[in-house]
Amino acid sequence: MTGRIAMRVVALGYLAALLAIPVGMVFYRAFEKGVGPAWDAVTTPPAQHAFWLTLTVVGIAVPLNAIFGVLTAWLMARRQFPGKRILDGLIDLPFAVSPVVVGLALILVWGQDGWFGGALTDAGIQVIFSTPGMVLATIFVSLPFVVREVLPVLREEGVDQELAAHTLGANGWQTFWRITLPTIRWGLAYGVILTTARALGEFGAISIVSGKIAGQTETLTLFVEERFQSFDLTGAYAAAVVLALIAIVVLVLMTRLQRDEETKR
Amino acid sequence: MSPQPSSVGAGVGTDIAAGASQAPAARRVPLAKPDWSTIAAGGTVVAWLSLIVLVPIAAVVAKALGGGLDAFWSSVTNAQAIAALKLTVSVSAVVAIIDAVMGTLIAWVLVRDEFRGKKIVNALIDLPFALPTIVAGLTLLALYGPKGPVGINVAYTQAAIGLALLFVTMPFVVRAVQPVLMALDREVEEAAESLGASPLTTFRRVVLPTLRPAILAGVGLAFGRAVGEFGSIVLISGNLPYKTEVASVFVFGQIESGNVEGAAAVSVLLLVVSFVVLLAIAAFARTKGEA
């Protein structure tokens, strides 16, 4: 059984060198000079602004993606229409597009010289270098998660219960709220967690559409980069720790949801 | 039976209309014919998808080809762009191969081995998906950068790009292979071993053919992700033109310096690579499904 031990050592060693030790190192670097400086670095006004801006963007993008995701999943699982296969392929498109290309694409549509941007600028609405552009970028990159988690659940459950509810006189809304939504709740929760994690961490697309104006359009991820480029390593590592802690919370939630689902079956 | 799609025309009478169009349930899963709710929901979904995704992507293609094919060609054959594209594809290919080997090994250990803390290791696999890419880059820089404690400094080299890509793409193959390995019937392996096959032969001849579709799917996703990756690379690679500048960083630089046409041209190439990978995975999944 030496082969088994050797494989275990190689696999765990690889994960340690690639993931665990580097992430541990960020925590160490952030608190190297004590908790005080790290705390001060993430409570400066620009840091707090970045935190609230991130929450705002995520708070708008995630519910919109959840609604779109459930609607799309329902459409694909319960309805027959031409072009279904194409729609199925298009849903995954955002995963295949580089974040930088997303940023460029949004500028070309919503920027001052863009397809829609010119008219909007005349109307006094600024999308690029402002919160709406950052929300659009975040929606783009995290679009497929909810669909991909909810669709298999809807397909697996079938329509028996929905038909029964309908036979018993429930209208569409009642069936949705009492039957469909409870059925998909774990898948939806899982999808929302993945969407949130992706939305919180978006960097490439946001860094192009935001213009990176410190204290105005700087999210937490942009704040990490800006602190690093300004040689404020404690600030960069401390903000990175905040994001890493959120990531760990996400992992714990994912693991718990998976377990709940397994015990349910 | 149908939930009303968003707020589009939700009225009392329409419920009956939606219900009335439902054919009596057949034996197979009944899928309703297009009715008003399908049209309303479908219209909403297509409009939203167009506004968020399709129109912006069309704008990139239009910008890249707007100056004619000659302008497009000269943009993508610019020496710096070619160097960036070559570097991106070659490092991504190496990373995808390492992912295939290490991902399968990790999945194997997670499914077949028993040790303390396995659940934690299993949860850790998803860390690269949950961790913001800029933090991933900073993380690697903290350990393998100029002031790192281990005395290895890969900052501003091509190895650094590979390392960052290995970090962000690690979960793809593991998560693709794991469920297949769990569902694998061990009796076949036991039969092979009882017939005198060595563990290595058993793996190569019995297990690997079953895992191959999953490994390839994971590799495809990893490669697609690696080609477009930006956040984890930008701090650690140094972005030196011709040396450590990947395609996404090149596009970023072109946008910053105002060459939007050049940025769009290289973006289109990146999009083509992504689409080919997506289509290959889909085609592969279909042939597997028919087999």
Image (spheres, grey):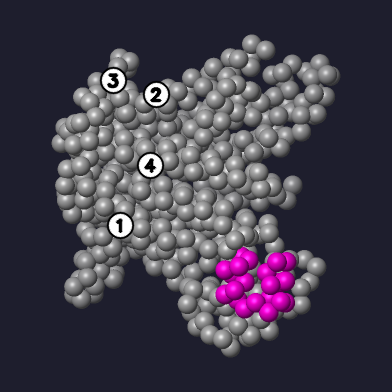
x, y (%) of residue A13? 48, 19
CB under 8 Å between callouts 1 and 2? no
Residue that carries the numbered disc 4 in the rendered image = A246
x, y (%) of residue A54? 30, 52
Furthest-bottom residue in this view: B13
Residue that carries the numbered disc 2 in the rendered image = A21
Q: Nearer the viewer, residue B219 or B267?
A: B219
Is B147 above or below relative to B228? above
Residue that carries the numbered disc 3 in the rendered image = B148
Task: State the separation of the CA atoms marked 3 and 2.
Answer: 12 Å
Task: Please tell me whether mark 4 sits on a helix, a strand or a loop.
Answer: helix
Tell me which chain the residue with mark 2 is part of: A
Task: Please tell me whether mark 3 sits on a helix, a strand or a loop.
Answer: loop
Q: Amino acid at mark 1?
A: Thr
Residue that carries the numbered disc 1 in the rendered image = A56
Task: State the separation of the CA atoms marked 3 and 1.
Answer: 35 Å
Q: Which residues are magenta?
A: A160-180
Q: Residue B114 magenta-drawn? A: no
Placement of the N terminus of chain B among the 4 image quadrants: bottom right
The dominant secondary structure in magenta is: helix
**For discs 3 and 4, the disc positioned in front in the rendered view:** 4
Is A153 above or below relative to B132? below
- Residue A170 appears in the picture as rendered: yes
